[in-house]
Image: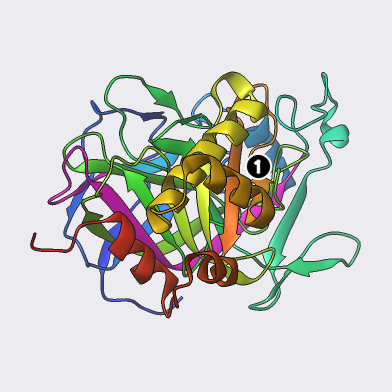
Amino acid sequence: MKNYNMFNIECNYQTKINKENEFIARVKTNQKICINTINAYGDKFKDLNELMTLINCKDGKTHHHPLTGPIYIKEAMPGDVLKVHIYKIEVKEMAQSLSKTAGIEPLENPEIAERIPVISEKCSEKEISYTNGIKLPYKPMIGMIAVSPTIENIKTGHAQKRNGGNLDIPFVTEETDIYLPVDVEGAGLYLGDVHGLQGYGELSGIAMEASSKVIIDVEVLKPRKKLDNIIIIGKEPFSKKECIGIVGIGNKMNLEEAVLDAFQGSYNVLQQCIPTMSQNMVKSLITLIGNSFNGQAFSKTSESTNVIVISKEDLQKVTKNKYEKLSKEIEKILFEEKGK
């Protein structure tokens, strides 16, 4: 990574997301920030022995899914929306293994060998080495991004509606904008659980977990109407098209609830783009142009997540507007002009 001259924030191994945590940094809007994160296993590792010690929590010192945060964002107040732009994600050590609790078919009382741990590394700017000589695409993403909730405590590895947390959505990647509803003064931004590669659904429960450096900046926006869903805008990695994504989160590992939450958020957002169309007509329209992707499909220890994605080209057709820069055009619709 280039030697950026910017505000640097080290990982403080935070294990809970709540408004009572002491802020570890205070940053201004439109200021580039370098945030260091630690992999979901809980600490850095050099070999399989160290990795397995972390996986099994044998040292008694580490905690899975440590986060960096909370970060105080100046000017952010309850009712605002925090826009996070991700410039760059650079991974450090990374590894994968099977899980006893996460995924569609979690293992029951596995032996070490059954967890098939694999340590991987970047072999180019576009590929990572896997195992048996396999090369896979390098597609870094942020698994956990959140702002502080007002009341409930969110454990790391979990998620909550509006505030975020363990989304595990590959769309949260480089050159995307993430919009998070703010519930407390200063927002209280948390980052962590970066992956070098993950498919939608995270089907086996654990992706290519990595420590990282993440370069972002933030902006505070004021919504015209209350926003209850996290929004993502940028180039969606599966379609490779510029898209808007509306995130849904299900309570108690309920994927149906996550899809419903994303669907309701989608028609609330799309209706603001097409105010002359009835809500029921917008629902029908989303069936034709919306694509539903799972984030965390299932886990015994985490809420399910979903994102409904609509491409820029389809949005242009149904709104009959030309979007040169999708994020800027959507912001004009959903948020108030600055200075007003």
Residue at (59%, 27%) from the top-left corner?
Answer: 257
Q: Is residue 96 magenta?
A: yes
Q: Is residue 112 magenta?
A: no
Overall secondary structure of the magenta stretch? strand
Depth check, front residue: 116 or 337: 337
Where 135 sits versus 10, above or below?
Answer: below
Left/right of residue 238 with respect to residue 4 in the rendered view: right
* Residue hosting label 1: 50
Residue 303, x across and y down, in percent: 58, 28
**Residue under the point 45% across and 78% down:** 322
* The C terminus: image quadrant: bottom left
Quarter where residue 103 is shown: top right
Residue 70 at what x, y percent from top left?
29, 40
Task: Tell me: 303 left or right of 100.
Answer: left
Let me know if residue 208 appears in the view. Answer: yes
Q: Is residue 43 above or below residue 236?
A: above
Few, some or many C-alpha atoms within 10 Å of disc 1 (few <14, some 14-19, many ≥20)? some
Residue situated furthest left in the rendering:
339
> How many numbered marks appear?
1
Whole-percent x, y for residue 274 in the image: 43, 57
* In-front residue for pair 200/70: 200
Between 178 and 2, the one lying in front of the other is 178
Residue for point 68% across, 64% down: 121
Q: Position of residue 268 (x, y in %)?
A: 43, 43
Amino acid type of disc 1?
Answer: Glu
Q: Is 163 or 205 nearer to us in this picture?
A: 163
Q: Is residue 36 left or right of residue 129?
A: left
**Hey, which quadrant is residue 254 in on the image?**
top right
The span picked out in magenta is: 70-97
